Amino acid sequence: MSRSIIQANDLVKAYGPVTAVDGVSFEVEEGEVFGFLGPNGAGKTTTISMLCTLLNPTGGGATVNGFDVVADRAEVRASIGIVFQDPSLDQYLTGQENMRFHASVYGVPRETARVRIKELLEMVDLYDRRKDQVLTYSGGMRRRLEVARGLVHYPTVLFLDEPTIGLDPQSRKHLWNYVLDLAKKENITIFLTTHYLDEAEHCDRIAIIDHGKIIALDTPDGLKRSIGGDVLTLRTADDPKAARVLKTKLKLDPHEVAGGGIHVAVRNGDAAIPKILKALPMTVDSVTLTRPTLDDVFIEMTGRQLRDEQGDMMAGFRTAMASRTRQGRPMM
């Protein structure tokens, strides 16, 4: 029977009069791939920073691997690995040297590290390039090396901050294959943020956070089922007015989307289209009927699309880790 590897209980973080995280509660099971989605300012950065012991909660609490994020900071840090959004490898070292340095920072015994590094580099198909400088690696190879490096000290939870940002579609697909394979082989719990909603489909469960609160938490299929049967996308001569008409006349809940158009969830799209066309007093340029996607779920839950974000989730962590490393002390 699986256990909860992460538990957040009424987690609160306030900055003066501003509450960034407002009573967040959730659990992540051991071995789960858990996605955290939210727009800028939603509270996901602050939540994860508390889980990684970068910030102390204002209220509530959380545990990671059974350790309290405030009382057991060292134990929590030893339990987690992190792959930053921004590159954090030393490009003038070889892949193997980057791995060795990370192992030494975490106090992994030399012989254990030697075996572990070989095992991980083989898993991510980089063993043959282990003696090459990282500056000769492609973007996809560097990300795979960062994933391997994050696992060298046998963490229980691996945090991935936008792991495929900047990669081409093929490299993104390959990296995900490696990550999911590693999760199974290593029995690692994956906690990730991503703004690529197609990547969120890989998650066992997804939490959507907005304005400091979790507004939905379910499997990808469960989230899609929650918003109804079909999604209609309409483009009209006057989208704002069309949205008001659909809301008042047909009691629907339309959402305008960036770039023009309206999304509206309906139970039976085929039957709804004639009623909608009859109710609208302006020209309708196009109507598209689709099954719900995670993008539709996000629009339905938050009223807007999930924008591309320049995630700075771990900026403070990188600074702290660099400081600790210079002092010869492991951050985690």
Image (cartoon, rainbow, N blue to C red):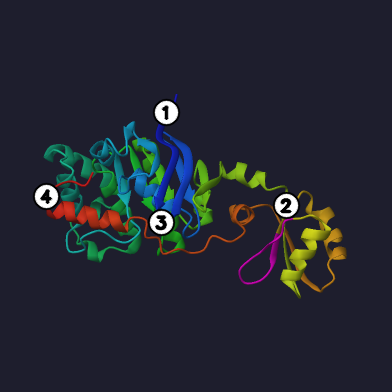
Is 249 colored magenta in this rendering? no
Magenta part of the chain: 253-263
Could you tell me which quadrant the N terminus lies in? top left
As drawn, the label of residue 3 is 1
Which image quarter: residue 158? top left
- Secondary element type, mark 3: loop
Rendered location of residue 62, percent (x, y) = 38, 37
Q: Does 113 sit left or right of 148 as displayed?
A: left
Rendered location of residue 87, percent (x, y) = 29, 61
What secondary structure predominates along the stretch shown in magenta? loop
Q: CA distance from mark 1 to mark 2?
A: 36 Å
Q: CA distance from mark 3 to mark 2?
A: 29 Å
Q: Which residue is mark 2?
A: 230
Contact? badges 1 and 2 (CB < 8 Å) = no
Mark earlier in primary sequence (2, 4): 2
Mark earlier in primary sequence (1, 2): 1
As drawn, the label of residue 162 is 3
Residue type pointed to by label 1: Arg
Q: CA distance from mark 4 to mark 1?
A: 34 Å
Q: Residue at x 61, y 69 (%)?
A: 258
Residue type pointed to by label 3: Glu
Evaluate whether residue 177 shows in this view.
no
- Secondary element type, mark 1: loop
